[in-house]
Structure formats: C-alpha cells, structure tokens
Amino acid sequence: MPLVGLAPLLLALGVTCGGAALVAPSPAPRSSGPWSYTTGDARLDARLRAEATSLARVFGVLPNLVLFEDAQNPNAYASERSTGPLSDGTVAIGLTLIARQLGQGARGEQAVASILAHEWSHILQIRQRCMLAGTARELHADFLAGYYLGRRYGGVADAAVAAGRAVYQQGDYRFGDGNHHGTPIERVQALMQGFLHSHLSLPLAYRLGERCALALGTSGPSAR
C-alpha cells in the first residue's frame, strides 16, 4: 500500500502505526436551526450525495444525511433517530464544519469524507449493538473511518494525511470526561491502523478495530 506523503505527517505528530488503539457516542448536540438537505451549492450537494452513496456501499448502512447550522460549534454527529425516509438513523454535519474543512485546500474534500465516515461508523456500531463505550467507541469509529478512506481512495496516502490532520485537530485531553474522544495522537493512530488494514473484509476490520480501540483506550493517563 503506497505511503508516500504519509511519513511527514506521522513524524510531525510523533505517531507510529503499530500497537495499541481505541467507548458510547457523545450525546447528540442540538442544532441551532432547522435541518436542511442542501448546502445551497448544487455541486457540493452532488459531492455529498456521492460520498453518502460510497459510505453506504462500504458500511452497508443507510442513514439519512442532513445539514444544520453550526456557526457557534462546528460539529457533526450520528443518531439512531431517523429524520427522513431511511431507516438506519441520521448523520448530521454542520455547514460551518464543512466550510472550514473545504477551506483548507485540495485535501479538504477528503477531510469531509473522513468526518462523514466517522459518523457513519457510529451508525454501524448502533446496527451491530457495539458494546464499546466512551473513548474506545470513538476511537473504534476513527479506525473504521481510516478503513473507509483506504477502500474509497485505494490506499492513496493523501486521503490519510487529510483525515489525520482533521482528527488530530479534534482530539482532546479531557481524561475522565464522558465526551473524551481520545487524544490527538490516539485518534491519528486509530485512523492510520484502519487505513493500513483496508484490505480486510468489513467484519474482520470491525473486530480488529475493536481490539485496537481497547488497546489505545487503556494506554492513556486516564487508564493508569
């Protein structure tokens, strides 16, 4: 699997892709406005629909994809509650979050894909009645997001670099907080593990991701 371009990011973040990894999704935030099914940009809408189709094909789940105003708190989330005709719950992504990621340049679209893949992974966890909770559940979703990117982009490292930057920026150090998603390094490690194992079938990757998540989730200060 080609990794040209990946090494600089891993070196900059101090990440190694061996060893350990990734507990319930955080409560769904309330949107500050009504749901929407359009960004107001026909081309962007088409790209989001195409990404949703690809995600559904890889993960085998069909949530409703909706947009919301998130100017005060750029965010995305998944819920088992359905907001539309599809039965596998809802993935919601904020318009500000999309704009911020796309504004970062050529890899912005891949960063948006990684965020959607993380939330799609939560829908899959709900479908599979995943027993992981808290940080481990979040890191498992990061692993599966990396897995998706490897399948979606054929292992091209640029996708992993874009996603790695996105999850690194969203990591936190709130150990003991029920909404702790993992440290920046843990989140990148989980995503890269999934990316490197994208040749596996989804059932095998799902189980490997659980082990990886549990290993990462017991390696931080909160576990000591």
Image (cartoon, grey):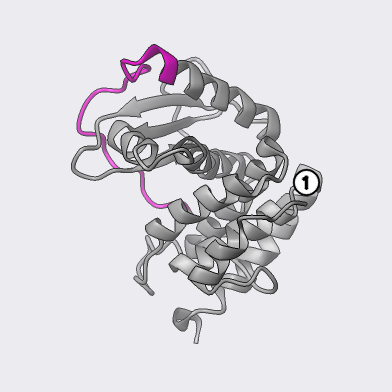
Outermost residue on the top side: it is 42
Question: Which residues are drawn in magenta?
Answer: 25-44
State the image coordinates of residue 152 (x, y, percent, origin top left): 67, 36
Write the residue at 52% across / 37% down.
113
* Amino acid type of the residue tagged 1 in the rendering: Pro
Q: Please state if 223 lies on the left or on the right of 58 as rendered.
A: left
Q: Nearer the viewer, residue 103 or 94?
A: 103
Quarter of the image for residue 140 reads bottom right
Q: What SS does tag 1 mark?
A: helix
Q: Position of residue 26 (x, y in %)?
A: 40, 52
Is residue 216 something one can see in this rendering? Answer: yes
Left or right: residue 155 versus residue 16 is right
Depicted 173 relative to depicted 35: above or below: below
Q: Does the image show residue 131?
A: no
Residue, x 50% and y 81% (percent of image)?
223
Residue on which disc 1 sits: 203
Residue 38 horizontal/vertical position (percent): 36, 17
Q: Residue at x 56, y 66 (%)?
A: 10
Residue 28 lies in magenta, yes or no? yes
Instruction: Work out whether residue 47 or residue 25 is closer to the camera in this orientation and state it.
Output: 47
Q: Position of residue 133 (x, y in %)?
A: 52, 60
Residue located at (59% from left, 61% from top):
190
Q: Residues within 10 Å of mark 1 (few under 14, many from 20)?
A: few
